[in-house]
Amino acid sequence: MATFKVELPNLPYEHNALEPVISSETLQVHHGKHHQTYVDKFNAALEAEGIETEDVLNLFEIVSKLSPAIRNHGGGYWNHKFYWESLRSPNEDNKPTGKIAELINESFGSYENFVEKFSASGAALFGSGWTWLGQKEDGSLIIHNTPNQDNTYMDIVEEKYNPLLTMDVWEHAYYIDYQNKRPVHIQEFFKIINWDKVNDRLN
Ligand code: MN
């Protein structure tokens, strides 16, 4: 009988805080239904398989040896928590500041180039998944896609980096507000990136 369980984290803001980029309705369904379901199914899998751990990340490191339920629902639990914490209320002139602004210039040449590359990566992801900005061991930044609910901490994912920011490109993240227009959602997404949080996540 596993005793390790996770809980649905509270959103770090009100449901309407990201409007008009992401509607209150989307957040209610995305957090209250989708994220809750990942939490419930992850807990059910931990229980059924008698898995104990002190940290979800420890499970990701051996995820290839665990069931698809742990990989998919554990990833869904963790990735969404990280996603909510990556966002804040929209600002038309939302730009990176401090150290992350310097690193973006060093790695991508300019903020505009970063926006272009991150957008193209999100638009090119076939099906469902996540677009990440991460910091590699040598300090440089990387833009990387993972399918489904995978993330860099999982042993099945080759690319390794410290995740700084993530964008959910599953249809459920934007369909109510943008229907099939993922590129329009991505364009708006830059207004709600919490660059202070991204700076806090740097090594
Ligand atoms: Mn999602």
Image (spheres, rainbow, N blue to C red):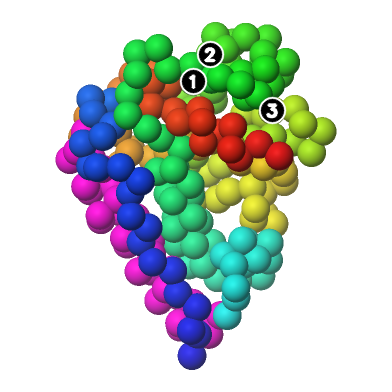
Instruction: Name the outermost residue toward the bottom.
Output: 1
Secondary element under disc 1, as helix, strand or loop, is helix
Q: Where residue 116 is drawn, which disc sits there?
A: 2
Question: What kind of element bears circle 2?
Answer: helix
Asked whether disc 1 touches disc 3, contact meaning CB atoms under 8 Å apart, the reply is no
Q: Identify the residue at image location x=30%, y=42%.
A: 13
Q: Position of residue 165 (x, y in %)?
A: 53, 35
How far from the left and from the top, in percent, is residue 44?
40, 76
Q: Which residue is mark 3?
A: 141
First of labels 1, 3 by sequence position = 1
Disc 1 crowd rating (10 Å Cα; few below 14, some 14-19, many 20+) is many
Q: Secondary structure at mark 3?
A: strand
Q: Which residue is at the far right?
A: 138
Q: Are the residues at dot 1 and dot 2 in contact (C-beta closer than 8 Å)?
A: yes
- Quarter of the picture containing the C terminus is top right
Residue at (46% x, 38% y) in the render:
86
At 51% from the left and 31% from the top, the residue drawn is 196
Q: Let me know if residue 182 appears in the view.
A: no
Q: Nearer the viewer, residue 31 or 124?
A: 31
Nearer mark to the viewer, of 2 and 3: 3
Amino acid, disc 3: Leu
- Look at label 1 and name its amino acid: Ser
Q: Which mark is residue 119?
A: 1
Q: Where residue 97 sits: x, y (%)?
A: 56, 19
